[in-house]
Every structure is written in structure tokens, then in C-alpha cells.
Image (spheres, helix red, strand yellow):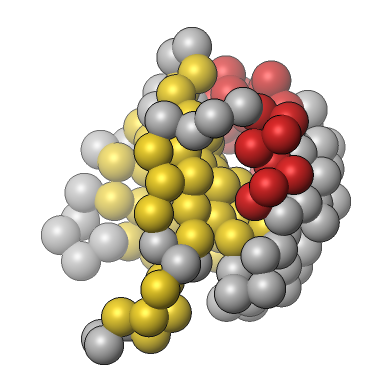
Amino acid sequence: MLIWNEFIKLLGCSKLDSKFINVSGDFNELPKLEEGVLGDREYYSFLHSGVLFLLEDEVVDQITFYAEKVDGFSVYKGELPVSIDSSEHEAVQILGHPLASGGGKMDALMGYIDRWVKYEKEGYALHLQFNQNDNLSRVTLMK
């Protein structure tokens, strides 16, 4: 299993880079591959590991870690910057005041939109989502 800093280093990697190619071996799992409607996005879903890689123009743009079982993903078992069972309040105590936040309300078309907070770090952004019960639901690294 990769450690947190190794995931950060994968942001911006080409899908042809050995670091990205070796991810399947690190997870001991082959991903489910899907292509975006316009053909410029690829989704590498490691369902059993609870991790989704979004590639734009063949480069790793986002990595999402699932903190709850949803959309066919298992719960991610590895290291995260906050505890897997954190509330928004607990996450903010650990990470400090976020750069931006939103969600936490119903939308007529999409239903409930998870509450989220976003942090800008050196070289990447960190996005945390919280479900209606104020439990961490996803953690996303963004280029």
C-alpha cells in the first residue's frame, strides 16, 4: 500500500510513468477503466481498495479516497491526513481553517450535496467531503 506522500507525488504523472503503472501492483488489484463522455478523461477505479484516479489528457489530475462504502467502492484502509471517522469539526481542528467550503444542502436536481472543505497545500489541493451525518465520506487530492 502506498503512503500518503507517494499519492501526492502521483499527481501530474503521465499514465505511462512507471509510478502510475505500478499502482495496480501496490493495490494488488486491476482497476475498472472508464472513459469520460468527451474522451479527455479516464477513470481508474480500484473498487476493492477504495481509490479512484481521474486522469485528464492522460495525466493524473485527481485521486479520491472513499471513507464510506458507496458507488461500488470499499472503504479505503490506508493513511489519510485525518481519521477515517472524522467529522468536519475534527478535520478543521487538525488541518486548520479551510480556504473554501460549501454544500451541506438539498438540490432539486441532485438531491443532498455533501458538505465540503478545501485546502490549498504546496503543489496540490486537498478536498474533504462530509455526508449528512457529518462523517467523512471522501478525501480528494487535486493537481
Q: Residue at x 46, y 38 (%)?
A: 118
Give whichever of 98, 82 is nearer the camera: 98
Estimate the x, y position of residue 20 in percent, counting from the top left: 56, 31
Left-right relation of 7 to 56: right
- The part of the image, by quadrant, that contains residue 55 is top left
Q: Residue at x 27, y 61 (%)?
A: 36
Left-right relation of 9 to 105: right
Give whichever of 20, 89 is nearer the camera: 89
Q: Residue at x 48, y 53 (%)?
A: 116
Q: Quadrant of the N terminus?
A: top right
Q: Residue furthest left?
A: 38
Left-right relation of 2 to 88: right
- The part of the image, by quadrant, that contains residue 133 is bottom right
Estimate the x, y position of residue 108 in percent, counting from the top left: 26, 88
Q: Quadrant of the C terminus?
A: top left
Q: Residue at x 40, y 62 (%)?
A: 103
Q: Is residue 68 visible?
A: yes
- The part of the image, by quadrant, that contains residue 38 is bottom left
Against 125, residue 30 (above or below) is below
Estimate the x, y position of residue 17 in percent, counting from the top left: 49, 23
